Amino acid sequence: MRLLWLAVVIVCTRTLAAQTVRGQLVDSISRTPLHGAFLTLLDAEGLERGRAITDAAGQFVLQAPAAGTYRLRSKRIGFRPFVSAPLVLGMGETTTYNAAIDPIPVPLKEVVVAGEQQCDVAAGASMAVLWEEIREALAAVAWTSRGSGYWYELSLFEREVTTGGRRAGPDSVWQQVGYHQVPFRSAPALELMVNGYVVVEDDMWNYRAPDAEVLLSDIFLRTHCFETRAEKGLVGLAFTPARGRNLPDVKGTLWVDRDNAELRYLEFTYTRIPERLNAPRAGGRVEFMRVPNGAWIVRDWVIRMPVARVVSGAYNTAAPRVVGYREAGGSAVQIKTQGGTVVYSAEPTATAESAAAVVAVPAVVAAPAPAPAPAPVSAAPAAAVLAAPAEGRKPMRDFQQLLREEFAGSMATDAYGLVQEFRPSWLHSRGPSEVELRVYVDGFLLGGLQSLHSIPKLEVERLRRLSGPEAAQHYGQGHSSGVIEVWTRRNE
């Protein structure tokens, strides 16, 4: 691990009740702040004692529960894992620790080799690299669930479908709003190991789905084997129950974007369902999303449970047979911080029919039971619709947008240079001077105007300028000076 600069300053502040580590992380190459990096504070035994995520300035604050020796572990997608040298914290002391973190030079798609199989997730080379990226996101999801939470507006549903996936009755849909630490929570990993993922109680079959805490647990890693997979645009870490597991369990895949290494979704099915029930469609899907401040959340979830009926067979035998499925889940319609900043908002134009395929999963659900409903989702705000000009007529320049065709020959090196050359008026605030114009990339907050310098020209597909009211409609309050949207080639 190459560390270009490091500063440790101990300041005795006996008035503080806790031992504190504060500091900043930066990119070792560009020297820009490393925002959204997930940090854990480890004690001398390697046990986790605190968690934090760096802010837009790359800064963090961690508090230790007692005086002692600790290490900082940092992980951010696209950067190498980092573990600090031991830090000795005295009672009531504050330690300032700054570090430069190396970016990963090789893209994930060139590191992961599909087909690698291990029952130790860290044993294989490419599997270990993939697991590092997944663990960072799952740990951040788990951290969010333990914190004070976000304000959610959720659309929850239940539905019944046939064995072929057609709806068998009306959907039941309802809204739920308020602060939630996490939209769904699983049973503890130890309980799942002992009792299994399908538990029969009072003629009801309770189906359980693994959450981030379970997937990160040593118990889950110890009771499952792993394999790397690849699909168009994605790489996956597949898991199956280890040999000797005879209880109902889950198998599935955690899928990661092969270009930016971000965790996309978990899909899973149930194995060894009681009474040898044949239900290949039983399972679920959980979609993850990184919000602008670097935290990770569950955006959508769905669980599909078989509905069985005892059917008589030959020689007076009777056995349960799947006659349909019950689906239950939900989607985030809007998510806000405690300060009221909108970090996610689903497109209002999404319909129930279009959302039926993108839903989500409560941790424990009993089957058989009522019906469900849809849940619209779209991570990014709607892009502008571009109409083709009439044949033979030169298209009019849209001064609220800047398309690749217009700047293809520019000598600019980054998005800021493109705006400065072709749309200089965008660089002037049109709202209150104390409210900074913000930049969003592919629907996610990047930072202020200067953050345009961090986007290479070659990645830019188009840019768009939103006025204060337009920005508020898409991204919520706090954007009165407007927004510059950058849509990259990755998003096309």
Image (cartoon, grey):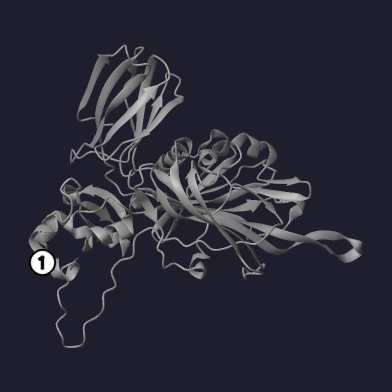
Q: Callout 1 environment at 10 Å: few (<14), some (14 to 19), or many (20+)?
A: few
Residue occupying the point 31% across, 65% down: 492
Residue 191 at least partly seen: yes
Residue occupying the point 48% across, 35% down: 146
Residue 113 at least partly seen: no
Q: In the image, is residue 224 above or below residue 110?
A: above
- The percent coordinates of residue 317 (x first, y second) are 88, 60
Q: In the image, is residue 361 above or below residue 187?
A: below
**From the viewer's perspective, is 103 left or right of 135?**
left
- The percent coordinates of residue 112 (x first, y second) are 39, 49
Considering depth in this image, is 53 or 14 the residue closer to the camera? 14
Q: Which residue is mark 1?
A: 409
Which image quarter: residue 428? bottom left
- The percent coordinates of residue 229 (x first, y second) are 47, 53
As drawn, which residue projects farthest toward the front?
432
Q: In the image, is residue 242 above or below residue 61?
A: below
